[in-house]
Amino acid sequence: MIWLILLPVVLLAAGLTYQWAGTKRDAARYPAPGRIVNGFHVRIAGSGAPVVVLESGIAASSVSWRPVQELLARGATVLSYDRAGFGWSNAAATPRTVANLVAELRAVVSASGLPGPYVFVGHSFGGLLLRHYAASYPGDVAALVLVDPLEPLEWHPASAEQLYRLGKGVMLSRRGATLARLGVVRLAVELLLAGSRLLPKLVSKASSGRGSSVTDRLVGELSKLPADLWPVMKSHWCLPRSFRTMAEYLERLPEACALPVQNSALRDLPLVVISASGTSADVRDQHRRTAGASSRGVHLNAEGSGHWVQLDRPDLIVEAVLRVAGGAGPLH
């Protein structure tokens, strides 16, 4: 019967060792492509005007902007970065409130030494952050491009069903952190990239009860990235801190959406708001209203695109940046 005691201990030790070795190997294979500035990973590409700053979605990193950054960098200076807890950045040292996130973005932009004002481009939750940024630091903002941005009405007031879903998401993320620490997430993702679905589905099901949908969604989003970036994304989501950070973002989402957004900052700002083709009618209407808050606002539909417009239609985002920047030069 001694093996009943020893087996869990051996498996635990093996999982911890597997995770430690894999994390060390990933750090050597996939170093940060940019610089670490005050704990934040910052990547600057291109040169000249305009200076474009990219803000990611709620659990995304600078990797999700790679195709857009490469295109824009042909005729502009483009800064992408990882918010604390994601990508190559250090773990967050403060609560993930909108005020702290806006302050951190300001610190990153200031530390870059790039001349402002800037063209800010934000996806999803990042679009909501940029609206608060524009209200707090209007002098920094030359123009805005909001890519299928999160609208406050989507989560405020949150319904009982939404709160239940958020609670499940928080639970999934916290379990994911534990499984990542034990090497289970790493093994599941390795098998997923190798074409196997069984263990990844079992891990997803154990965490959320919806194995197929979780796995299929992960595969779908990953497949939109250039293949050489898949292992990079894998390395990030094998880290417990990615899941811990995600849990806090989800917990604070209703609070973030309850904050009043000052549309007065958009009054005469060059602005493009892009809606994904699958966006609901209510949210699309809000996108039009947001664009209409500026006398120079334009609303565009990203035909044939899912929520990840920057991966499905990077050309449209480049077009939008050129529009708000007044034609920054040929980007081709």
Image (cartoon, helix red, strand yellow):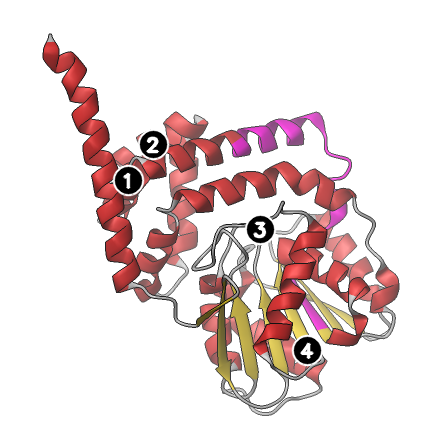
* Cα gap from disc 4 to disc 3, whole angstroms: 21 Å
Residue for point 25% across, 37% down = 16
State which region is magenta.
144-170
Residue to which mark 4 is pinned: 118
Q: CA separation, marks 1 and 4?
A: 41 Å
Residue at 21% over, 42% down: 18
Q: Is residue 195 visible?
A: no
Mark 3 Cα within 10 Å, few/some/many (few <14, many 20+)? many
Looking at the rendered structure, the secondary structure element under dot 1 is helix
Left or right relative to 253: residue 38: left
How many residues crowd mark 4 within 10 Å: few (<14), some (14–19), many (20+)?
Answer: many
Between discs 3 and 1, the one toward the N terminus: 3
Q: Amino acid at mark 4?
A: Tyr
**Disc marking residue 247:** none
Query: Which sits in the foreground, 13 or 254?
Result: 13
Q: Earlier in the sequence, mark 4 or mark 2?
A: 4
Type of residue at label 1?
Ala
